[in-house]
Image: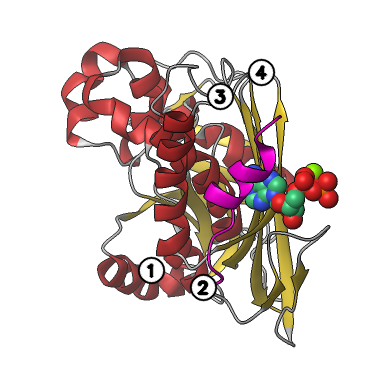
Amino acid sequence: MPSEFNLIREFFTPPNSRPDVRLGVGDDAALLAPAAGKDVALTIDTLAAGTHFAADAPADAVGHKCLAVSLSDLAAMGAAPAWVTLALTMPRVERAWVEAFCGGFYALARRFNVQLVGGDLSRGALSVTVQAAGLVDAGRGLRRDGACAGEEVYVSGVLGDAALGLERGGEFRRALHWPQPRVELGLALAGVAGACIDVSDGLLADLGHVLRCSGVGAEVMRGALPLSAAYREILAETGWTAALAGGDDYELCFTAHPKRRTDVAALAAELKIPLTRIGAVTQGRGLRLLDENGDVLPVARAGYEHFS
Ligand code: ADP
Ligand code: MG
């Protein structure tokens, strides 16, 4: 890429805002100094045009979302986001696109005091890879394998709007393009949640990961799933599939002991995020989905595509 150096200098060399960054962009690698007593949570995700976002998606939304999905992973681990690297592959350099991309990216980075410390630029089909690192008290990271029978299952926010954004556009598009990582919630769940995961591939699939990792099962009440007012309006016509199996929600799904109910309610009030109890962890393996009458709904093993 001919103007690589200038592009890095102009767009990807942000002023440093963190004392634990000894050396950021500009050398062969960043030098980072995690505080003593912390574990580093590390995650990486690629968003490819045509697969994870439309090639004509607004660039600021792409910049926002590529960071948001990584921060969501850190939130699910209960980690405070700290450092991020960014590998950007573009067919050609379009200044306006890069500028808008950076607008979305840095706005979110600033909100959570995340420092861009390195990256890469290359030419090719449009694709963005973000690696993010966060800090969590040693041994206290929230994991998928911590769910116990007797705990209850919660989910933050509302489910399904992002999938509806992909399917129908309109007012749902915002949820698809501008997911809000639940960073503060993840941090607050340390000591409250048994297990935690972020809902990126659909509730049933992601809760399924928690259950498998923890060696337990769950009963989920479909009627308890939190839906937006706009989703509720079209529920009869569109069905539950988006809420159960739609991706890209980036809400947190976690388990907590019933004695934590008041703590969870207090958290919801403090953070102004709905935290909805949707079911319970059970001893037997597998996920049982119950309808509004308490009858068991079939949950297809291979994929969760069809729920109406
Ligand atoms: P190298 O050849 O050592 O990999 P590069 O020329 O790729 O170096 O990058 C020079 C510096 O700019 C490195 O510190 C790298 O981390 C940083 N950098 C490159 N691209 C980006 C980017 N998109 N965002 C942030 N930093 C970047
Ligand atoms: Mg390089």
**Label number found at residue 52:** 3
Q: Earlier in the sequence, mark 4 or mark 1?
A: 4
Question: Which residue is denoted by mark 1 in the rendering?
Answer: 264
Range covered by the magenta-colored residues:
1-16
Q: Which residue is mark 2?
A: 192
Q: Nearer the viewer, residue 140 or 136?
A: 136
| Local SS, label 2 | loop
- Residue at position x 54%, y 64% from top? 114
Which quarter holds ligand 2? top right
Q: Return the residue at label 4.
A: 125
Q: Nearer the viewer, mark 2 or mark 4?
A: 4
Quadrant of image for the N terminus:
top right
Q: Tell me the CA gap for discs 3 and 4.
A: 13 Å
Mark 4–mark 1 distance (CA, rounded to whole Å): 44 Å
Q: Amino acid at mark 4?
A: Ala
What is the x, y in percent for residue 269? 25, 69
Indicate the secondary structure of the residue bearing disc 1.
Answer: helix
Going from N to C along the chain, the mark reached first, 1 or 2, is 2
